[in-house]
Image (spheres, grey):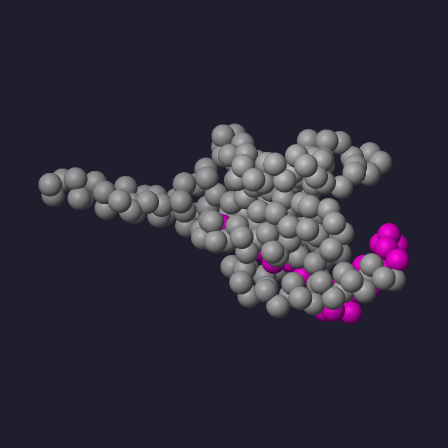
Amino acid sequence: MASFPSSEQRVVVLSGPSGSGKTTIVNRLIDQSPVPLRKSVSATTRRPRPGEVDGEDYYFLSDEEFRQRLSQDEFLEHAEVFSSGFLYGTLKSEVDLAWQKGAWAFLEIDVEGALNVMRQFPDAVTIFLKTPSPEEFERRLRARGTENEEVIQKRLATAAGELQYADRYRHVVVNDQLDRAVSEICGILKSEETQTNAWRISWRRDRSKSWWTL
């Protein structure tokens, strides 16, 4: 039987190189989005940093627990990030929880994880966020002052690789100015909601016609 994506069961994926401004934009979208969003809390095997709260910033799992839950098929996607030895992933229960609350599941994940999600949710709203230029990306990365030169070079190489997958996303947004980028993404989400509602009305109309012709 034909089906349509429920407006209450949508998945939104936001990816982009580290330093592209994802975290700031995610926080703005949670407050300003025209559709209800619930940000998925990722799981990780790294230790909490000062101020981080388990269950809010991340689910901090031991390597053993992470791998056990992985073997039980509890993860939507997972990966080792930056060859750090630490595992990160999205639990399927996070998506279910968003839907139970009538919200769209909002995943801020890397490209590898996003590609896995695309295979499982072909109708996911996928957005790739990037800086206006590679030079601007490097400037922002260095301005953070949180990484040494070795880490910076590794992130630059990773970003170059991730950019090659930007065309796999349904939308590419340039974060040249924060308010403009947030507004563009809000427009994308509103358009997706409108299209989904239109599909629903059409599906119901066609189903009703089919019923009357029986």
| Residue 156 in view (yes/no) | yes
Name the one closer to the observer, 83 or 51.
Answer: 83
In-image side of 152 versus 157 (left or right): right
Please name the residue shown 63% across and 44% down the image: 89
Q: Position of residue 165 (x, y in %)?
A: 59, 64
Name the one closer to the observer, 21 or 108.
Answer: 108
Which residues lie in the magenta part?
124-148
Please name the residue shown 58% across and 40% down the image: 70
Name the one closer to the observer, 187 or 22.
Answer: 22
Count of marks placed on residues: 0
Name the one closer to the observer, 134 or 201.
Answer: 134
Q: Residue 132: which quarter of the image?
A: bottom right
Q: Position of residue 144 (x, y in %)?
A: 85, 54
* Magenta region includes residue 126: yes
Q: Work out which quarter of the rendered image holds the C terminus and state it.
A: top left
Q: Position of residue 52 (x, y in %)?
A: 78, 35
Judge whether 47 appears above or below 140 on screen: above
Q: Residue 201: which quarter of the image?
A: top left
Please name the residue shown 54% across and 60% down the image: 169
In-image side of 39 versus 51 (left or right): left
